[in-house]
Image: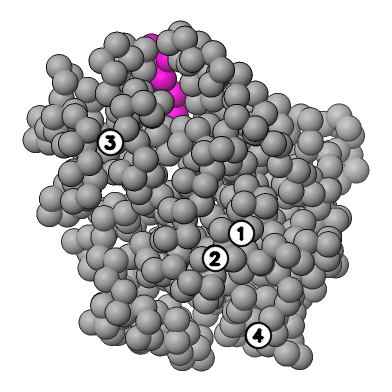
Amino acid sequence: MSLQTQNALCEEPPSIFESLEKLKNAIWSRRPILKDIMTKHGGKTLYDYSLDFLDVNKTPSLDKRKHELFEVVEKLLKARLGEQTAKKARKQLEKLPLVSTADHHGPIINNPFWINSNIISALPCFGNGCEDLDYLIVFSFASVSANNASVYPRGIEFTSSINGSGNFTRIPFLPDKLKMGVVYALRGFTKEDIEKGKNVLMQKVKDKEVSQELADSVRKYIEEYFENKNILETPDLNSQITKINFKIWPTLFHNSKSAGKKEKIPDLIYLEIETIVTELLQKYHLENPDSLIYKLLFNKEYEGLVYKFFNKIPGAFSLENHWGTYMFWAIEEKKFHRQGLMLKDGKLCSEDNNYIFDYTPEIISKALKEKKIYPGMMLCYLLISLYYGMKCLGGFCQVNDLTMTKYAWEKFLKEVGENEEAEALNPVQTKELGGDGLVLSYLKTSNDNLINARGIDMILSDKDTSFERYVNLSKKLTLSEAMNPMLPEMYEVLYSYDDRDLDLWKTPVDQIFKATGLYKKLVEEMGEVEIRGSPA
């Protein structure tokens, strides 16, 4: 359909459709593989597209290694979620080597990005003969700050509706001094942290930012899911998030007559990918000179080839623009900020030389154990997807970045004479767009606008949020329709403030809903799902 035809049919100012086209072109220019995916699949219903998630290619040459990954996952889950869950999750991975790697490691209830990513990833597991899929397994990235806007690991977010605007409120638990600390290295929430957070909530009531009714419900929610003994006895934030998300996820889906009713949908398991990769390195690679990963890391003849093939790939590093890191990030000692490293004369060094590590298996192993360093995104991609051959559902950035990493790794392997390893990459799937950048879950404000729903909004809603409703909606929306309202936010992720066209960035999302006809589809399917506590 042409731009002119769209405008005529919808009787909306052409500027909205022009803005959508410009936003897409700007995003595609930074992530061209995403453009290829949307050109090929954008017209499919979201449900039909999701069915392909379960189509996992066999990777015969890599399958023989997978038991190493499964052993590590089972070990971590046993410590966090118990032996039964750990064994069942391993059995599922052995049968279907599929995970999502789209998410950041934080409470699932905070940002609509991750709520919808997991709703959409779970679509093909509902009523599709997949009853033996007990879990939606996410290898999430903990290389984000506690104050990260897209996940906010230091506390919780919910929609505050006292003025009907749909603005959201943040309640911090971790102290301000840790807000830029990397999640991977941070301590867990304490009882004192939670009490301070509840005090912030009560102050917002006094300041008339949050209604008393809503605050009372949120306080009960905090006490049940964050202040319970199982969470407070867990010392690190990574493990707390695994436990919190596992318990919270089923409560998002209920109907008005039986709130909290458990539907047959997979339980949600979050494990931070950096810990998985660290365990794999220490157990199978750092002490094994015959390992391909050992050679990648420590063969001095390979160093120049790493710079040759991986330079400028997102998730790796840029020598020219001074971003990223060489294989590992350093962790700042007091505030736990991450520091980029580059390999120089046999040492990993930060740009200011405040962090220097001899680049030997012994020193790297020790630094990993002591959490002075942790694996970068490129190394995580290499191990989980390209060495162990897992199918990874990814976000709008990952489908591009992981594919570029695969191309670079294949060239690297051929250059060093590992032709069989290069050929083994052929069936590995990297263009698998999960639910990141797509939205199914919305709330209607008292101003008759639609906003992206946060998890607490869904939990506290007295309306129908049953999973079946999202399945039904996914059969009526195309991939492109589900992405359109997220384009301004995707644009914000990919462009720094100085590089943005402010008119594009500020494209009104409510006008996108109405101009494209999405508003009508959502309200017809999902009903009048108002925000709890909206004024009468």
1 and 2 marks in contact (CB < 8 Å): yes
Residue positioned 15% across, 17% down in the render: 345
Residue 315's spot in the image, x, y percent? Answer: 42, 32
Gap in angstroms between the C-alphas marked 3 and 2:
27 Å
Taking the image as drawn, is residue 530 in sight? no
Q: Identify the colour scheme used.
A: one colour
**In the displayed structure image, the side of residue 306 where residue 3 appears, left or right:** right
Q: Nearer the viewer, mark 4 or mark 1?
A: 1
Q: Which residue is mark 1?
A: 91
Which residue was labeled with disc 2? 87
Q: Are marks 4 and 1 in contact (CB under 8 Å)?
A: no
Q: Position of residue 124 (x, y in %)?
A: 77, 56
Disc 1 crowd, CA 10 A, few/some/many (<14, 14-19, 20+) = some
User: How far, Cα to Cα, is label 4 from label 3?
Assistant: 49 Å
Q: Quadrant of residue 255?
A: bottom right
**N-terminal-most mark, 4 or 3:** 4
Q: Which label sits in the foreground, 2 or 4?
A: 2
Who's the residue at 62% across and 51% down the image? 94
Residues under numbered marks 4 and 3 in contact, where contact means CB atoms less than 8 Å apart: no
Circle 3 sits on which residue? 287
The stretch in magenta equals 308-316
As drawn, the label of residue 260 is 4
Q: Is residue 312 magenta?
A: yes
Q: Are marks 3 and 2 in contact (CB under 8 Å)?
A: no
Say whether residue 59 is left or right of residue 75: right
Marks 3/1: CA–CA distance: 28 Å
